[in-house]
Image (spheres, coloured by chain):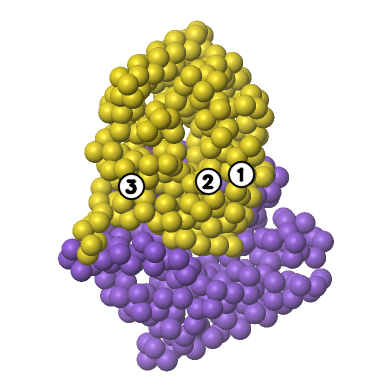
Chain colours: A yellow, B purple
Amino acid sequence: MVFVDKLLSAGRHNKSLLCVGLDPDVTLMPGVGLLGFNKAIIDATADLVCAYKPNLAFYEALGTDGLESLLKTVEYIPNFIPVIGDGKRGDIGNTAKAYARALFETFRFDAATVNPYLGHDAVEPFLEYKDKGIFILCRTSNPGASDFQDLVDARGMPLYQAVASKAREWNTEGNVGLVVGATYPGELKTIRKLCPEMPILIPGIGAQGGDLASAVKNGIDARGEKAIITVSRQILYASKGKDFAAGARRTAQGLRDDINKIIDQAVH
Amino acid sequence: MVFVDKLLSAGRHNKSLLCVGLDPDVTLMPGVGLLGFNKAIIDATADLVCAYKPNLAFYEALGTDGLESLLKTVEYIPNFIPVIGDGKRGDIGNTAKAYARALFETFRFDAATVNPYLGHDAVEPFLEYKDKGIFILCRTSNPGASDFQDLVDARGMPLYQAVASKAREWNTEGNVGLVVGATYPGELKTIRKLCPEMPILIPGIGAQGGDLASAVKNGIDARGEKAIITVSRQILYASKGKDFAAGARRTAQGLRDDINKIIDQAVH
């Protein structure tokens, strides 16, 4: 099954546009170990999400043990739920090919995030995996996003829109998506208009302060789908005690239901 | 010792601006294994280089075994030679902090390459390591570089120059450098003028077709230093047989000497 179908199918099965970011912070874990923590979170939320998204940085910081846990985490996630490897890689063709192999074959992710700064040949080796999803960073959720992404070219188009427009061009196989931060709802709205069909990965809710209602309303497609609302810390550390899994479930369920209410109002 | 001093000191000791890119391709290795190959290359070239630069992609593609070999490779490199971890990472503050920890503490690199697309707060956690080197992608060596890096803003400034100019601003601790491809000698010249003091990492010689003489002349600072001419495949696979280390040494020595002749002509 190609990525976008797997995403839609998991989302419909679980009635959810919520994606849990598996970004483990060992200093916040109640003595269960990284893999144990992830497994408990997955057990507690697998009926509430459309995808999981581990960010590779948190595993790399723990060295090869961390990456071993990442491999086992991906393996543990139920097969019908897509896993997005958030690595934001970007390198010249020959090297990008090695990264694509690492993410799609070694780590077996269903999708990956990719940085567009190097241009087409840095993205191309990812695009060749037609059944995988490639999420291109467009408008990131952080405060510094405007440093370069807002630079306006001679046509009056800011860089993040130029990226969205190139991404649409590169999407000949229907395997391209975009990353747009919930913290920039106006930009999200513009991008959804530019790219009505693409899945959009939307981080920035919760710890980063993005507004859920605007993110959902501006991010969904015409059918009320293809927005992937990603929440990490707010869910993982809802409770910092031994009941962290129950806390995560409660928060995830609340978010999933809130998202569905917002969609109902927006679409009907 | 801070990174730039370590770089200058190794370069002066070995009379070299050459950096060997340790980008192992297992399909091209004559049956010695990844770590054995790297060790033989290091043994054969450690008196000819100013730095080594492993690109993480090639190790990640081999999973945790590959990354274990990378850790051992970094450990094996003689202490006086700086090691640049080429990962081109870039992520929001909280995550960038984990990447910086991974590269500088777990993998113990002396310097790292960083992607500027996310702006200042994605680079900041790297900059906080004052004794490390942070090479910001400015003008990359690949054909697609122009897709976004050439976009010209309202002031008439292309993105790659906007990045160079921000990098200069962020360089309050003298730990910032730039990555500029040898395949764009005109852009390299402009950037060297904009940033006369920064080390510039220059890939693109050899397999990618960049011209050595223009790269050296346009890349060096006023004293004929601070250009890091990075060559990978041309050295590693100079000979594809059992004499690969001897072939690598011969090619590295030739390149080192050619670079020095070009500097002599340019500076005197």
Dots 2 and 3: beta carbons under 8 Å?
no
Q: Is residue A39 left or right of residue B136?
A: right
Circle 3 Cα neighbour tier, 10 Å, few/some/many (<14 / 14–19 / ≥20): some
Give the amino acid at mark 2.
Asn
Q: Are marks 3 and 1 on the same chain?
A: yes
What distance separates the C-alpha of mark 2 from that of mark 3?
Answer: 16 Å
The chain holding disc 1 is: A
User: Looking at the picture, how far across and down is residue A152, in whole percent?
Assistant: 23, 57
Can you see residue A63?
no
The image quarter in which residue B217 lies: bottom left
Give the amino acid at mark 3.
Leu
Q: Which mark is residue B118?
A: none
Q: Residue at x 34, y 41 (%)?
A: A192
Q: Secondary structure at mark 1?
A: loop
The answer to whether residue A142 is above or below residue A266 is: below
Q: Is residue B51 left or right of residue A266?
A: right
Can you see residue A151?
yes
Q: Mark 2 vs mark 3: which is more N-terminal? A: 2
Q: Residue at x 39, y 67 (%)?
A: B146
Give the amino acid at mark 1.
Asp
Q: Which residue is mark 1?
A: A131
Q: Which residue is mark 2?
A: A175
The image quarter in which residue B139 lies: bottom left
What distance separates the C-alpha of mark 3 from that of mark 1?
Answer: 23 Å
Dots 1 and 2: beta carbons under 8 Å?
yes
User: Looking at the picture, how far across and down is residue A177, in whole percent?
Assistant: 45, 43
Quadrant of the image for the C terminus of chain A? top left
Q: Which residue is mark 3?
A: A194
